Amino acid sequence: MFSPGSFTLDNGLRVVVVENPRAPVVVHAVWYRVGAADEPPGKSGLAHFLEHLMFKGTPSVPSGEFSRIVAANGGSDNAFTSQDYTAYVQRVASDKLELVMRMEADRMVNLQLTEEKATPERGVVREERRSRTGNSPGAQLYERRRAVTYLRHPYRTPVIGWKSEIDGLTAADALAFYRTHYAPNNAILIVAGDATAELVRSLAEKHYGKIPRRPVPARVRPGEPEQLAAKRVTLKNERVHVPSVSITWRAPSFASGETRHAYPLLLLDDILGGGATGRLHRRLVIEEKAAAGTGAGYLGTALDMGEFTVSASALAGGDIGRVEALLRDEIARILKHGVTEAELARSKRALLAAAIYARDGLGAAPRVIGRALTTGRTIADVEAWPERIAAVDAAAVNDAARAVFVERGSVTAVLLPEPAG
Protein backbone atom coordinates (compact mmCIF):
# COMPACT_ATOMS: atom_id res chain seq x y z
CA MET A 1 0.00 0.00 0.00
CA PHE A 2 2.60 2.57 1.06
CA SER A 3 5.97 0.91 0.21
CA PRO A 4 7.69 2.15 3.38
CA GLY A 5 11.31 1.80 4.35
CA SER A 6 12.17 0.81 7.91
CA PHE A 7 15.17 0.57 10.24
CA THR A 8 15.88 0.52 13.98
CA LEU A 9 18.35 2.71 15.85
CA ASP A 10 20.77 1.18 18.35
CA ASN A 11 18.62 2.45 21.23
CA GLY A 12 15.61 0.50 19.94
CA LEU A 13 13.68 3.31 18.24
CA ARG A 14 11.82 1.93 15.22
CA VAL A 15 11.87 4.35 12.26
CA VAL A 16 9.54 4.11 9.25
CA VAL A 17 9.86 6.32 6.17
CA VAL A 18 7.21 6.72 3.47
CA GLU A 19 8.68 8.78 0.64
CA ASN A 20 6.15 10.98 -1.18
CA PRO A 21 7.71 13.97 -2.95
CA ARG A 22 4.51 15.30 -4.53
CA ALA A 23 4.62 18.41 -2.33
CA PRO A 24 7.37 19.95 -0.14
CA VAL A 25 5.62 18.78 3.05
CA VAL A 26 6.29 16.10 5.65
CA VAL A 27 4.33 14.51 8.47
CA HIS A 28 6.49 13.64 11.48
CA ALA A 29 4.84 11.35 14.04
CA VAL A 30 6.02 9.60 17.20
CA TRP A 31 3.84 6.76 18.45
CA TYR A 32 4.31 5.26 21.92
CA ARG A 33 3.23 1.71 22.70
CA VAL A 34 1.22 2.81 25.73
CA GLY A 35 -2.35 3.92 26.22
CA ALA A 36 -5.21 4.07 28.65
CA ALA A 37 -5.37 0.28 29.02
CA ASP A 38 -1.82 0.36 30.46
CA GLU A 39 -2.63 2.70 33.36
CA PRO A 40 -2.24 1.67 37.01
CA PRO A 41 -5.53 0.78 38.76
CA GLY A 42 -7.26 3.83 40.15
CA LYS A 43 -5.43 6.22 37.80
CA SER A 44 -7.84 6.27 34.85
CA GLY A 45 -7.16 9.10 32.42
CA LEU A 46 -3.44 9.19 33.24
CA ALA A 47 -2.21 8.43 29.70
CA HIS A 48 -4.42 11.20 28.30
CA PHE A 49 -3.42 13.58 31.13
CA LEU A 50 0.25 13.01 30.27
CA GLU A 51 -0.49 13.72 26.61
CA HIS A 52 -1.68 17.18 27.70
CA LEU A 53 1.33 17.68 29.97
CA MET A 54 3.80 16.83 27.18
CA PHE A 55 3.28 20.42 26.00
CA LYS A 56 4.32 21.87 29.37
CA GLY A 57 7.94 22.30 28.50
CA THR A 58 11.57 21.26 28.75
CA PRO A 59 14.62 23.37 29.64
CA SER A 60 15.09 24.28 25.96
CA VAL A 61 11.41 24.57 24.89
CA PRO A 62 9.36 26.29 27.62
CA SER A 63 5.72 25.52 28.39
CA GLY A 64 3.39 26.32 25.48
CA GLU A 65 6.25 26.99 23.05
CA PHE A 66 6.14 23.67 21.18
CA SER A 67 2.89 24.35 19.33
CA ARG A 68 3.66 28.05 18.98
CA ILE A 69 6.99 27.28 17.26
CA VAL A 70 5.35 24.76 14.93
CA ALA A 71 2.65 27.29 13.99
CA ALA A 72 5.16 30.12 13.56
CA ASN A 73 6.94 27.94 11.02
CA GLY A 74 3.77 27.38 9.01
CA GLY A 75 2.95 23.94 10.42
CA SER A 76 0.32 22.27 12.55
CA ASP A 77 0.50 19.71 15.33
CA ASN A 78 -1.78 17.29 17.10
CA ALA A 79 -1.71 14.57 19.74
CA PHE A 80 -4.12 11.79 20.67
CA THR A 81 -4.47 8.93 23.11
CA SER A 82 -6.29 5.62 22.68
CA GLN A 83 -6.56 2.49 24.78
CA ASP A 84 -3.40 1.08 23.14
CA TYR A 85 -1.20 3.99 22.01
CA THR A 86 -0.38 7.67 22.33
CA ALA A 87 0.81 9.69 19.32
CA TYR A 88 2.29 13.14 18.67
CA VAL A 89 2.07 14.42 15.08
CA GLN A 90 3.33 17.47 13.22
CA ARG A 91 2.80 18.51 9.59
CA VAL A 92 5.41 21.00 8.37
CA ALA A 93 7.28 22.12 5.29
CA SER A 94 9.97 19.56 4.48
CA ASP A 95 12.78 22.00 5.32
CA LYS A 96 11.39 22.19 8.89
CA LEU A 97 11.65 18.44 9.52
CA GLU A 98 14.77 18.78 11.64
CA LEU A 99 13.13 21.47 13.75
CA VAL A 100 10.19 19.30 14.83
CA MET A 101 12.41 16.23 15.16
CA ARG A 102 14.70 18.09 17.54
CA MET A 103 11.81 19.30 19.67
CA GLU A 104 10.03 15.91 19.76
CA ALA A 105 13.24 14.11 20.70
CA ASP A 106 13.83 16.73 23.40
CA ARG A 107 10.50 16.10 25.10
CA MET A 108 10.93 12.33 24.87
CA VAL A 109 13.54 12.62 27.62
CA ASN A 110 13.59 16.15 29.11
CA LEU A 111 9.99 16.86 30.11
CA GLN A 112 9.74 18.99 33.25
CA LEU A 113 6.56 18.80 35.33
CA THR A 114 5.46 20.46 38.54
CA GLU A 115 2.17 20.44 40.37
CA GLU A 116 1.87 24.10 39.43
CA LYS A 117 1.82 23.09 35.75
CA ALA A 118 -0.38 20.04 36.31
CA THR A 119 -3.18 21.70 38.28
CA PRO A 120 -4.62 23.92 35.52
CA GLU A 121 -4.25 21.13 32.96
CA ARG A 122 -6.25 18.82 35.19
CA GLY A 123 -9.00 21.43 35.00
CA VAL A 124 -8.72 21.44 31.20
CA VAL A 125 -9.19 17.66 31.14
CA ARG A 126 -12.18 17.91 33.49
CA GLU A 127 -13.75 20.48 31.17
CA GLU A 128 -13.00 18.27 28.15
CA ARG A 129 -14.79 15.40 29.87
CA ARG A 130 -17.72 17.62 30.78
CA SER A 131 -18.15 18.98 27.26
CA ARG A 132 -17.66 15.70 25.42
CA THR A 133 -19.37 13.28 27.80
CA GLY A 134 -21.25 15.18 30.49
CA ASN A 135 -23.21 17.15 27.88
CA SER A 136 -23.83 14.22 25.52
CA PRO A 137 -26.31 11.47 26.40
CA GLY A 138 -24.98 9.41 23.50
CA ALA A 139 -21.43 9.61 24.84
CA GLN A 140 -22.67 8.73 28.34
CA LEU A 141 -24.43 5.65 27.00
CA TYR A 142 -21.36 4.62 25.01
CA GLU A 143 -19.25 4.90 28.16
CA ARG A 144 -21.66 2.75 30.18
CA ARG A 145 -21.98 0.24 27.36
CA ARG A 146 -18.20 -0.21 27.21
CA ALA A 147 -18.12 -0.62 30.98
CA VAL A 148 -20.42 -3.65 30.81
CA THR A 149 -19.01 -5.11 27.58
CA TYR A 150 -15.81 -5.99 29.47
CA LEU A 151 -15.90 -7.58 32.90
CA ARG A 152 -12.20 -7.29 33.76
CA HIS A 153 -10.24 -5.94 30.81
CA PRO A 154 -9.23 -2.25 31.07
CA TYR A 155 -10.99 -1.48 27.77
CA ARG A 156 -13.99 -1.04 30.07
CA THR A 157 -12.49 2.24 31.37
CA PRO A 158 -12.85 5.46 29.31
CA VAL A 159 -9.67 6.87 27.80
CA ILE A 160 -10.33 10.29 29.31
CA GLY A 161 -10.86 8.65 32.71
CA TRP A 162 -13.59 8.66 35.32
CA LYS A 163 -14.14 12.11 36.82
CA SER A 164 -13.43 10.99 40.40
CA GLU A 165 -10.05 9.59 39.35
CA ILE A 166 -9.12 12.52 37.10
CA ASP A 167 -9.47 14.75 40.16
CA GLY A 168 -6.78 12.74 41.94
CA LEU A 169 -4.14 12.71 39.19
CA THR A 170 -0.91 14.52 40.06
CA ALA A 171 2.28 15.68 38.40
CA ALA A 172 4.09 12.87 40.23
CA ASP A 173 1.69 10.32 38.70
CA ALA A 174 2.31 11.70 35.22
CA LEU A 175 6.10 11.79 35.67
CA ALA A 176 6.16 8.19 36.88
CA PHE A 177 4.09 7.08 33.88
CA TYR A 178 6.35 9.12 31.54
CA ARG A 179 9.55 7.65 32.95
CA THR A 180 8.10 4.14 32.76
CA HIS A 181 6.80 4.18 29.19
CA TYR A 182 8.28 7.08 27.20
CA ALA A 183 11.51 5.51 25.99
CA PRO A 184 12.95 5.21 22.47
CA ASN A 185 12.66 1.42 22.59
CA ASN A 186 8.93 1.83 23.28
CA ALA A 187 8.35 4.24 20.41
CA ILE A 188 7.98 4.35 16.64
CA LEU A 189 9.00 7.34 14.54
CA ILE A 190 7.15 7.67 11.22
CA VAL A 191 8.02 10.28 8.61
CA ALA A 192 5.90 10.56 5.47
CA GLY A 193 6.31 13.01 2.62
CA ASP A 194 9.11 14.90 0.93
CA ALA A 195 12.08 13.33 2.74
CA THR A 196 14.40 10.52 1.72
CA ALA A 197 15.16 7.54 3.91
CA GLU A 198 18.80 8.62 4.00
CA LEU A 199 17.92 12.08 5.31
CA VAL A 200 15.55 10.70 7.93
CA ARG A 201 18.14 8.20 9.12
CA SER A 202 20.74 10.94 9.49
CA LEU A 203 18.42 13.26 11.42
CA ALA A 204 17.01 10.44 13.58
CA GLU A 205 20.51 9.31 14.57
CA LYS A 206 21.44 12.90 15.41
CA HIS A 207 18.40 13.75 17.55
CA TYR A 208 16.86 10.50 18.78
CA GLY A 209 19.93 8.25 18.65
CA LYS A 210 21.56 9.81 21.69
CA ILE A 211 18.59 9.03 23.97
CA PRO A 212 19.40 5.92 26.04
CA ARG A 213 17.04 2.96 25.97
CA ARG A 214 15.35 2.02 29.26
CA PRO A 215 13.63 -1.10 30.57
CA VAL A 216 9.92 -1.00 29.71
CA PRO A 217 7.41 -3.31 31.43
CA ALA A 218 5.58 -5.89 29.37
CA ARG A 219 1.99 -5.06 28.47
CA VAL A 220 0.23 -7.55 30.73
CA ARG A 221 -3.52 -7.03 30.90
CA PRO A 222 -6.27 -9.04 32.61
CA GLY A 223 -8.03 -11.55 30.41
CA GLU A 224 -11.79 -11.72 29.92
CA PRO A 225 -13.96 -14.52 31.30
CA GLU A 226 -16.38 -16.27 28.98
CA GLN A 227 -19.57 -14.32 28.33
CA LEU A 228 -22.55 -16.29 29.61
CA ALA A 229 -25.38 -13.76 29.54
CA ALA A 230 -26.64 -11.04 27.22
CA LYS A 231 -26.64 -7.56 28.76
CA ARG A 232 -28.78 -4.49 28.31
CA VAL A 233 -28.11 -0.84 29.17
CA THR A 234 -30.83 1.81 28.94
CA LEU A 235 -30.26 5.53 29.42
CA LYS A 236 -33.03 8.11 29.54
CA ASN A 237 -32.30 11.83 29.24
CA GLU A 238 -34.40 14.93 28.64
CA ARG A 239 -31.95 16.03 25.93
CA VAL A 240 -32.73 12.99 23.80
CA HIS A 241 -35.23 13.69 21.02
CA VAL A 242 -34.62 10.68 18.77
CA PRO A 243 -34.42 7.21 20.36
CA SER A 244 -31.62 4.92 19.21
CA VAL A 245 -30.42 1.38 19.79
CA SER A 246 -27.17 -0.48 19.26
CA ILE A 247 -26.11 -4.11 19.68
CA THR A 248 -22.44 -4.87 20.32
CA TRP A 249 -20.52 -8.13 20.39
CA ARG A 250 -16.91 -8.67 21.39
CA ALA A 251 -14.99 -9.87 18.36
CA PRO A 252 -11.51 -10.97 17.32
CA SER A 253 -9.13 -8.20 16.30
CA PHE A 254 -6.37 -8.28 13.70
CA ALA A 255 -3.93 -9.10 16.50
CA SER A 256 -5.90 -11.12 19.05
CA GLY A 257 -8.30 -14.05 19.18
CA GLU A 258 -9.42 -15.89 16.03
CA THR A 259 -7.61 -13.42 13.79
CA ARG A 260 -8.68 -15.29 10.63
CA HIS A 261 -12.09 -13.63 11.11
CA ALA A 262 -10.73 -10.05 11.05
CA TYR A 263 -10.69 -9.42 7.30
CA PRO A 264 -14.09 -11.09 6.77
CA LEU A 265 -15.53 -8.95 9.59
CA LEU A 266 -14.21 -5.82 7.90
CA LEU A 267 -16.17 -6.77 4.79
CA LEU A 268 -19.24 -7.72 6.84
CA ASP A 269 -19.11 -4.26 8.39
CA ASP A 270 -19.39 -2.71 4.92
CA ILE A 271 -22.06 -5.17 3.74
CA LEU A 272 -24.28 -4.29 6.71
CA GLY A 273 -23.47 -0.62 7.19
CA GLY A 274 -22.00 0.60 3.90
CA GLY A 275 -24.11 3.72 3.45
CA ALA A 276 -27.19 3.70 1.22
CA THR A 277 -26.24 0.33 -0.27
CA GLY A 278 -25.78 -1.41 3.08
CA ARG A 279 -28.26 -4.05 4.20
CA LEU A 280 -29.34 -2.20 7.31
CA HIS A 281 -30.12 1.06 5.52
CA ARG A 282 -31.92 -0.73 2.71
CA ARG A 283 -34.08 -2.77 5.09
CA LEU A 284 -34.80 -0.40 7.98
CA VAL A 285 -34.81 2.97 6.20
CA ILE A 286 -35.93 2.30 2.63
CA GLU A 287 -38.06 -0.84 2.78
CA GLU A 288 -39.59 -0.75 6.28
CA LYS A 289 -39.43 3.04 6.73
CA ALA A 290 -38.87 2.44 10.44
CA ALA A 291 -35.49 4.13 11.02
CA ALA A 292 -34.00 7.52 10.32
CA GLY A 293 -30.49 6.10 10.06
CA THR A 294 -28.47 2.93 10.54
CA GLY A 295 -24.84 1.96 10.98
CA ALA A 296 -22.38 -0.84 11.53
CA GLY A 297 -18.85 -0.75 12.86
CA TYR A 298 -16.08 -3.26 13.28
CA LEU A 299 -13.32 -2.18 15.67
CA GLY A 300 -10.56 -4.62 14.80
CA THR A 301 -7.43 -2.54 15.29
CA ALA A 302 -7.08 -3.07 19.05
CA LEU A 303 -4.10 -4.84 20.60
CA ASP A 304 -6.50 -7.14 22.43
CA MET A 305 -10.10 -7.99 21.55
CA GLY A 306 -12.23 -6.05 19.11
CA GLU A 307 -15.93 -5.22 18.82
CA PHE A 308 -18.68 -5.39 16.21
CA THR A 309 -21.68 -3.06 16.50
CA VAL A 310 -24.90 -2.52 14.58
CA SER A 311 -27.09 0.48 15.34
CA ALA A 312 -30.15 2.43 14.26
CA SER A 313 -32.11 5.52 15.24
CA ALA A 314 -35.90 5.75 15.09
CA LEU A 315 -37.91 8.24 13.11
CA ALA A 316 -39.30 11.13 15.16
CA GLY A 317 -42.11 9.64 17.20
CA GLY A 318 -41.18 6.17 15.97
CA ASP A 319 -41.16 2.86 17.79
CA ILE A 320 -37.63 1.99 18.94
CA GLY A 321 -38.83 -1.49 19.85
CA ARG A 322 -39.71 -2.16 16.21
CA VAL A 323 -36.35 -0.74 15.11
CA GLU A 324 -34.53 -3.10 17.46
CA ALA A 325 -36.59 -6.06 16.26
CA LEU A 326 -35.69 -5.27 12.64
CA LEU A 327 -32.00 -4.98 13.54
CA ARG A 328 -32.11 -8.39 15.16
CA ASP A 329 -34.03 -9.86 12.24
CA GLU A 330 -31.39 -8.65 9.80
CA ILE A 331 -28.68 -10.30 11.88
CA ALA A 332 -30.76 -13.49 11.91
CA ARG A 333 -30.99 -13.32 8.10
CA ILE A 334 -27.22 -13.08 7.84
CA LEU A 335 -26.85 -16.11 10.10
CA LYS A 336 -29.43 -18.15 8.19
CA HIS A 337 -28.76 -17.19 4.59
CA GLY A 338 -25.29 -15.61 4.61
CA VAL A 339 -24.04 -12.85 2.35
CA THR A 340 -24.31 -12.89 -1.42
CA GLU A 341 -21.46 -12.90 -3.90
CA ALA A 342 -22.74 -9.62 -5.33
CA GLU A 343 -22.65 -7.94 -1.90
CA LEU A 344 -19.16 -9.26 -1.25
CA ALA A 345 -17.87 -8.03 -4.62
CA ARG A 346 -19.33 -4.56 -4.04
CA SER A 347 -17.76 -4.29 -0.59
CA LYS A 348 -14.38 -5.44 -1.86
CA ARG A 349 -14.45 -2.76 -4.55
CA ALA A 350 -15.38 -0.09 -1.98
CA LEU A 351 -12.66 -1.05 0.51
CA LEU A 352 -9.94 -1.47 -2.10
CA ALA A 353 -10.82 1.88 -3.70
CA ALA A 354 -10.61 3.57 -0.30
CA ALA A 355 -7.16 2.05 0.22
CA ILE A 356 -5.97 3.42 -3.12
CA TYR A 357 -7.30 6.90 -2.37
CA ALA A 358 -5.61 6.84 1.06
CA ARG A 359 -2.20 6.70 -0.61
CA ASP A 360 -2.72 10.16 -2.14
CA GLY A 361 -2.56 11.99 1.21
CA LEU A 362 0.29 12.21 3.70
CA GLY A 363 -1.80 11.54 6.80
CA ALA A 364 -2.94 8.00 6.05
CA ALA A 365 0.45 6.26 6.11
CA PRO A 366 1.53 7.48 9.58
CA ARG A 367 -1.93 6.74 10.94
CA VAL A 368 -2.29 3.24 9.48
CA ILE A 369 1.30 2.16 10.11
CA GLY A 370 1.49 3.69 13.58
CA ARG A 371 -1.73 2.04 14.68
CA ALA A 372 -0.57 -1.32 13.31
CA LEU A 373 2.89 -1.28 14.89
CA THR A 374 1.57 -0.29 18.32
CA THR A 375 -1.08 -3.03 18.33
CA GLY A 376 0.89 -6.15 17.50
CA ARG A 377 0.94 -6.07 13.71
CA THR A 378 3.74 -5.57 11.19
CA ILE A 379 4.52 -3.50 8.13
CA ALA A 380 4.09 -6.70 6.11
CA ASP A 381 0.51 -6.90 7.44
CA VAL A 382 -0.17 -3.33 6.33
CA GLU A 383 1.28 -3.89 2.88
CA ALA A 384 -0.64 -7.15 2.40
CA TRP A 385 -4.00 -5.58 3.33
CA PRO A 386 -5.37 -5.30 -0.27
CA GLU A 387 -4.43 -8.89 -1.14
CA ARG A 388 -5.96 -10.22 2.08
CA ILE A 389 -9.20 -8.35 1.48
CA ALA A 390 -9.34 -9.59 -2.11
CA ALA A 391 -8.83 -13.20 -0.97
CA VAL A 392 -11.87 -13.28 1.38
CA ASP A 393 -14.74 -15.43 0.12
CA ALA A 394 -18.40 -15.53 1.15
CA ALA A 395 -17.89 -18.65 3.26
CA ALA A 396 -15.31 -16.84 5.39
CA VAL A 397 -17.67 -13.89 5.96
CA ASN A 398 -20.47 -16.24 6.97
CA ASP A 399 -18.16 -18.16 9.34
CA ALA A 400 -17.10 -14.89 10.97
CA ALA A 401 -20.72 -13.80 11.43
CA ARG A 402 -21.60 -17.10 13.10
CA ALA A 403 -18.57 -16.84 15.40
CA VAL A 404 -19.38 -13.29 16.55
CA PHE A 405 -23.18 -12.90 16.48
CA VAL A 406 -23.90 -15.02 19.55
CA GLU A 407 -26.85 -13.84 21.66
CA ARG A 408 -25.27 -14.54 25.06
CA GLY A 409 -22.33 -12.34 24.11
CA SER A 410 -24.37 -9.32 23.06
CA VAL A 411 -24.72 -5.95 24.78
CA THR A 412 -27.77 -3.91 23.79
CA ALA A 413 -27.68 -0.17 24.49
CA VAL A 414 -30.85 1.93 24.21
CA LEU A 415 -31.08 5.73 24.34
CA LEU A 416 -34.54 7.11 25.16
CA PRO A 417 -36.13 10.49 25.86
CA GLU A 418 -36.89 11.26 29.50
CA PRO A 419 -40.68 11.47 29.88
CA ALA A 420 -41.95 14.94 30.72
CA GLY A 421 -42.87 15.56 34.34
Image: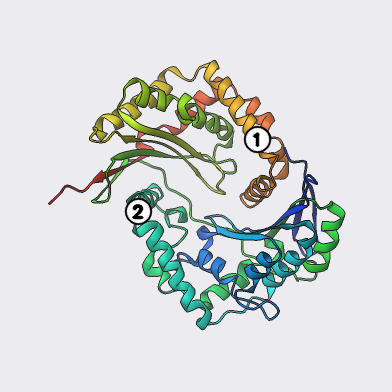
Cα separation, mark 1 vs mark 2, equals 33 Å
Residue at the limit of the structure toward the left, as seen here: 421
Please give the residue where the numbered disc 1 appears in the rendered image.
355
In this rendering, does residue 42 appear at all? no
- The disc label shown at residue 286, or none: none
Q: Is residue 287 above or below residue 294?
A: above
Who comes first in sequence, dot 1 or dot 2? 2
Circle 1 packing at 10 Å, graded few (<14), some (14-19), many (20+), is some
Q: Position of residue 310 (x, y in %)?
A: 41, 35
Q: Position of residue 168 (x, y in %)?
A: 42, 74
Quarter of the N terminus within the rendering: top right
Decide which of 321, 36 is in the foreground and name it: 321
- Relative horizontal placement of residue 240, taking residue 173 as reference (left or right): left
Query: Which residue is rendered at x = 26% and y = 29% of the image?
Result: 322
Q: Is residue 212 above or below residue 266?
A: below
Query: Which residue is rendered at x = 32% and y = 26% of the image?
Result: 326
Decide which of 97, 105 is in the foreground and name it: 97
- Relative horizontal placement of residue 145, taking residue 418 as reference (left or right): right
- The disc label shown at residue 136, or none: 2
Amino acid at pointer 1: Ala
- Identify the secondary structure beneath mark 2: loop
